[in-house]
Image (cartoon, grey):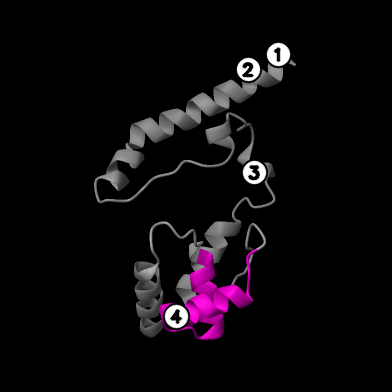
Amino acid sequence: MKQIFEMAESIQKDAWQVVHDTNIIDIWSSIGATINLVGSLKMGLLINNNESTYAGHFETVAERITAVLTPEMRANILRIKNSIPIEKKVMGIQVYKAVIEHGIQDIDSFWTWKEQNPDDGIITWMP
């Protein structure tokens, strides 16, 4: 058991070093972004990211969204995201799905859509 802890600690140390060396948190924070480290690294459970069911999934989602995004969809997404109050917890993927798949164009229509389409944890939708 000691060996697995040592292996995990070594991998996590390397991951934290990448975060530190790239200064990524400070860079994003400098433009007003809120950075929230999540997942295995945050919990001290990182040992092999390639074993995750979701390894590469969200990168593929981003590529697919980029491929279908029109200027009008982009404007609608940005307008809706900007209208969501900070205290409301809304996943970006919900906004993307509402706009891209269902043609939602404004915040009021989004709230109605969201009530009719509750999330159930991780959303695996892709356009």
Real-space Cα distance between discs 2 and 1? 6 Å
Q: Earlier in the sequence, mark 4 or mark 2?
A: 2
Asked if residue 92 lies left or right of residue 57, the reply is left
Could you tell me which residue is drawn at 67 percent across and 46 percent down? Answer: 52
The residue to which callout 3 is attached is 50
Specify the quadrant of the image occupied by residue 106.
bottom left
- Indicate the quadrant containing the C terminus: top left, top right, bottom left or bottom right: bottom right
Q: Position of residue 71 (x, y in %)?
A: 36, 82
Q: Earlier in the sequence, mark 1 or mark 4?
A: 1
Question: Which amino acid type is shown beneath numbered disc 4?
Answer: Asp
The residue to which callout 4 is attached is 108
Would you say the residues marked 2 and 1 are in contact, meaning their CB atoms lie under 8 Å apart?
Answer: yes
Question: Which amino acid type is shown beneath numbered disc 3?
Answer: Asn
Residue 3, compared with residue 58, is above or below; it is above
Based on the picture, tell me whether residue 6 belongs to the magenta stretch. no
Question: Which amino acid type is shown beneath numbered disc 2?
Answer: Glu
Based on the picture, tell me whether residue 103 belongs to the magenta stretch. yes
* Element on which disc 1 rests: helix
Could you tell me which residue is drawn at 34 percent across and 41 percent down? Answer: 24
The residue to which callout 2 is attached is 6
Highlighted magenta segment, given as a residue range: 93-119
